[in-house]
Image (tube, rainbow, N blue to C red):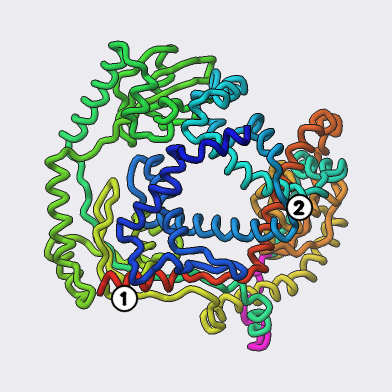
Amino acid sequence: MLQSMRSAAKYVWIILIVAFVGGFLLVETSGLLNRDVVTSNTAIAEVNGEDILATEYFRAVQLREQQESQRLGRGLTLDERQQLEQAVFDDLVNDRLVRQELDRRGIQVTDAEIIAAAQTSPPPELLQNPELQTDGQFDPEKYRRFLANPAAKAQGILQYLEAYYRSEIPKQKLFAQVASDVYASDARLWALWQDTHDSARVTYAAFRPELIPDSAVKVSDADVSAYYERNRKTFERPGRAVVSLVAIPRTVTAEDSTAARQRAQALRDEIAAGAKFEDVARRESADSASGAQGGDLGRGPRGRFVPEFEAAAYALQPGQLSQPVATPFGYHVIRVDAKNGDTLAVRHILVRIGQSDSTAARTDRAADALAKDAAAAEDPKKFDAAAAKYNLPKTQVVAIEKEPLTANGRYVPSVSAWAFGGAKVGESSDLFDAPEAYYLARLDSLTPGGAQPLAEVRDEILRRLQREKKLELLLPRAQEFAAAARTKGFEAAAQATKGVELGTTPMFTRTSLVPGLGQFTAAHGAAFGVPVNQISAPVISRDAVVVLRVDQRVNADKGAWQAQKTQQRRQITQALRQSRVREYLSSLRESAKLEDNRKDVLAAQRAQSAG
């Protein structure tokens, strides 16, 4: 079989054409790699002395972007592209680190291992191929017939499988070595079960820092400086940009809504005339996620959908088509596949309400005129003049590096990535296209990220230290309360204590977010360590000193735990192994000598383009 894999070398499977040939040619011929700036030997990064070439990086980015654009059915925003570029970079770095570790450990793969894996463990893209499935599940027999078909050899698939397993099997061997000693003992499994199945209800008295005035605590400059030095890494901040933003909304008219409804009706009529619902959904639905699954929204109870959709769906009988249903998302054609009480299996086709061609053309012209008037990096005032000329309100918002921008509760695509992608203060952006509007931005200020100086975080540190000192001052007061509660009763002691906050919780587990007590605090531990009807000693929590009385506790059922222990061990062991591998990769990354040249290379490209 391995010889068959190799004999197909003159053929290239279509996936490999895109990945390793077409992607490279597209990058080269598109001008993305300007030969005056980036040559075939230019390194985008260096990992322990081994280069990652810029050509490899850009090729991988373009391939991933093509795949994502195809999946989404649209081009990527700058925010999405920025996240994609980082993911590609991380993958390339991790690949170098893993291959270096494989060499260090002498881990290899044999031909026999490749053949066995190819026959029994297909890669994910083949597992998910509908042609190799029966009733939605991977069919091993179909897969074996597929491998035996001469077409698999002719199309280069056997060659692809050899390359895939020659890369993947050594990695799996490495990860198996790394996680070989992972084992979930009975004691650990029982403790994890208890965390989510033991429950308690308590009455608590909380002494909050607000009871102590700021004047009663003294925090010295030395205290602040020492705290800063101990916790310097926690004060690292991302970059911050202030941008001015104007928008030209894509106003939808009554005629646009009518057109969308008519389109939904036409799709319904097509299905009613005999077209397959699933095929029409894949072809037409604006909900790309469910559309790829033939419009399938799954099976579930009430409460999954907006009221308009849910009312229409529950009024249908299995197999029945709805008339177009209007919701805030657009118009839907709905079909119920199965109905059992309040549980529905339902599909839909979504037609969004968008601008008609004529309305969109007017909006496009207005947006182009705005961009033309505002575009002048050397004259920021033109941005203000253009906004005033077209009577568009200007909003000033803060963008955070590597985070999408929101303005007035709405996501604004690409602006944040543009602001931190080499734009200069005073510069106006290109037009950014979103479903609801065109956006134009001006960069008003830019603050680099990194460790914040002590002067910038001094007040924050001061508040933290004041809170800690106030909690220490409250401890004697809480101790007096606990003593009184043991003699007079909890509620009586609370009535006699000024400023105490008294509350009773619902039943909660060790992992619950508890009103008044928070989550994963010392008070949680006390609730499960103090006997029922007993009063705890004061515990210092994050934002209070707490004394509590355990009113009720229900311990986990050990029999129920024993009944599911095998399945739990399998799940926990898998999770622990995955966690160990992630920690291992993180450790490799932290100890590596990594030189990241992306900013320099991209800056050089921008400078060359501008010239």
Query: At which x and y percent is residue 420?
Result: 39, 68
* Numbered circle sitting on residue 219: none
Above or below residue 382? Residue 549 is above
Residue 265, by quadrant, is top left
- Is residue 229 found left or right of 395 in the rendered image? right
Residues rendered magenta in the picture: 208-223
Look at 18% across and 64% down and name the residue there: 387
Q: Is residue 504 visible?
A: no
User: How many numbered markers are drawn?
Assistant: 2
Q: Is residue 307 magenta?
A: no
Above or below residue 459? Residue 415 is above
Query: At which x and y percent is residue 327?
Result: 33, 32
Amino acid at circle 2: Val
Q: Please name whichever residue, 221 or 444, is drawn nearer the observer in this view of the structure.
A: 444
Q: Is residue 399 visible?
A: yes
Look at 63% across and 64% down and name the residue there: 589
Mark 1, residue position: 425
**Secondary structure beneath label 2:** helix
Upstream in sequence: badge 2 or badge 1: 2
Mark 2, residue position: 178
